[in-house]
Image (tube, helix red, strand yellow):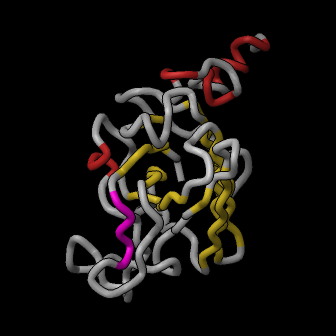
Amino acid sequence: MRATPLLIAALLCVPIAACGGGGGASDRAAPPAASPGSVEASGTFAAPPGGVVTYDEALVPVGATAAVDQTAAGGSTTVTLDVAGLMPNRQYGAHAHANPCGAEGKDAGPHYQLTPDPVTPSVDPAYANPHNEIWLDFTTDEQGAGRATSTVAWEFPADRRAKSVVIHTMPTATEPGKAGTAGDRAACITVGF
């Protein structure tokens, strides 16, 4: 039996937004990995629910966009976050989180930590730091675009991976008792790390 090009495309590109079509509120989780150790997710922020959502439209307006690219090889992982259409000339915190995005910011759960802090919420810099977590803080330019890259000396374990990137209202704190905190959750993009 011969597969038609449309059938092949349908099998490879579900959902269609993952392959460059669609957009807006229908954007969902990350597409299948482009190559071994590589993940890409992108979309347009919309009101919840969804896989690319804004919780604070003043800081992350409906219609703003984000893209996450992750590559892993040789025992290290690099994650890049690109945003456009956010409030200009402003600092934001951003981190990989344990759960997918949901109707409320808290649905994304805590920051993903390679070595989980036994105390929650985690504010101990021994656990809440850019070597045990993926921190993607950025500052937007005059057009509201920004970019951050984080490289860590580990790869996600096969049985426990991050599932989203959350954009926070403030830059990430590093001092004891506040480490890892970055204000409220302004937006979220579900990523299939």
Answer with the quarter of the image where residue 10 lies.
top right
Q: Is residue 154 left or right of residue 93?
A: right
Q: Looking at the image, which is closer to me, 67 or 70?
A: 67
Answer with the quarter of the image where residue 151 lies.
bottom right
In this view, 3 is above or below 121: above
Q: Which segment is the magenta one?
A: 179-183
Which residue is located at x 43 percent, y 61 percent?
Answer: 170
- Observer able to see residue 57: yes
Q: Is residue 159 left or right of residue 193?
A: left
Q: Looking at the image, which is closer to me, 13 or 124?
A: 124
Q: What secondary structure do most residues of the magenta stretch adopt?
A: loop
Residue 182 is one of the magenta-drawn residues: yes
* Residue 57 picture location, percent across and down: 42, 34
For the N terminus, give its image quadrant. Answer: top right
Which residue is located at x 79 percent, y 14 percent?
Answer: 5
Q: Is residue 106 left or right of residue 128?
A: left
For the C terminus, give its image quadrant. Answer: bottom right
Residue 67 is one of the magenta-drawn residues: no
* Residue 150 picture location, percent across and down: 62, 69
